[in-house]
Amino acid sequence: MAGLWRSYQGLISKHPWTVQIITAGSLVGVGDVISQQLIERRGLANHSVRRTAKMMSIGFFFVGPVIGGWYRVLDRLVVGETKSVALKKMVLDQVGFAPCFLGAFLGISGSLNGLTLEQNVVKLKRDYGDALIANYYLWPPVQIANFYFVPLHHRLAVVQIVAVIWNSYLSWKANQI
């Protein structure tokens, strides 16, 4: 495990953007597998590989680039490493970014699942509030620790490790008919 972590550290220092995006896409996929197998209890025979591929594509092309970019912007907006800076970053993240990101994520997944605009709006009205409340239970303490203790180039990885659980929930929520 230590060797794997050292390899990851070496790769992320040489290619931070690429590694962050690959990590995000892979872990969104892991979250979907957990969702299908543990939450929905589909079993291997009924596992939707297509759905997992869709969720991974959202991770590669939306989650990784958007969150990685947001952390860079946030680091320029609020400079420093004190507790108050971490709190300010968490508030900006959770009040400004998270609601928009969550709505976009659910909308994109609905579109990839073939929902019409009207169906997607109905689904967002049904699921968005619950997902946002769940977000506020999990993410504020994680983000305060992340912004205070974790260097910028490792933040997306920390978030994605915690997000395996969150991605499982989001995958389940996003793929409910």
Image: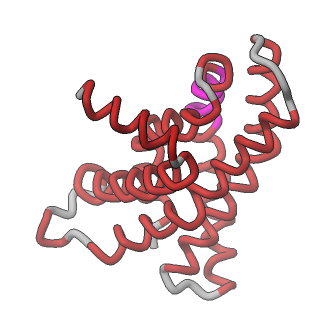
Q: How is the image coloured?
A: secondary structure
Q: Position of residue 16 (x, y in %)?
A: 55, 46
Residue at the image position 69 percent from the left and 75 percent from the top: 121
Residue at the image position 44 percent from the left and 66 percent from the top: 55
Horizontal placement of 150 versus 74: left or right?
A: left
Residue at the image position 56 percent from the left and 55 percent from the top: 64
Give the tally of numbered discs: 0
| Residue 143 magenta | yes
Question: Where the N terminus falls, by quadrant?
Answer: top left
Q: Which residue lies furthest to the front in this view?
A: 14
Q: Where is residue 102 in the image (x, y as percent from the top left)?
A: 65, 55
For residue 133, what is the image quadrant? top right
Q: Residue furthest left?
A: 45
Residue at the image position 52 percent from the left and 66 percent from the top: 58
For residue 54, what is the image quadrant? bottom left
Question: Where the C terminus falls, by quadrant?
Answer: bottom left
Q: What stretch is highlighted in magenta?
A: 136-144
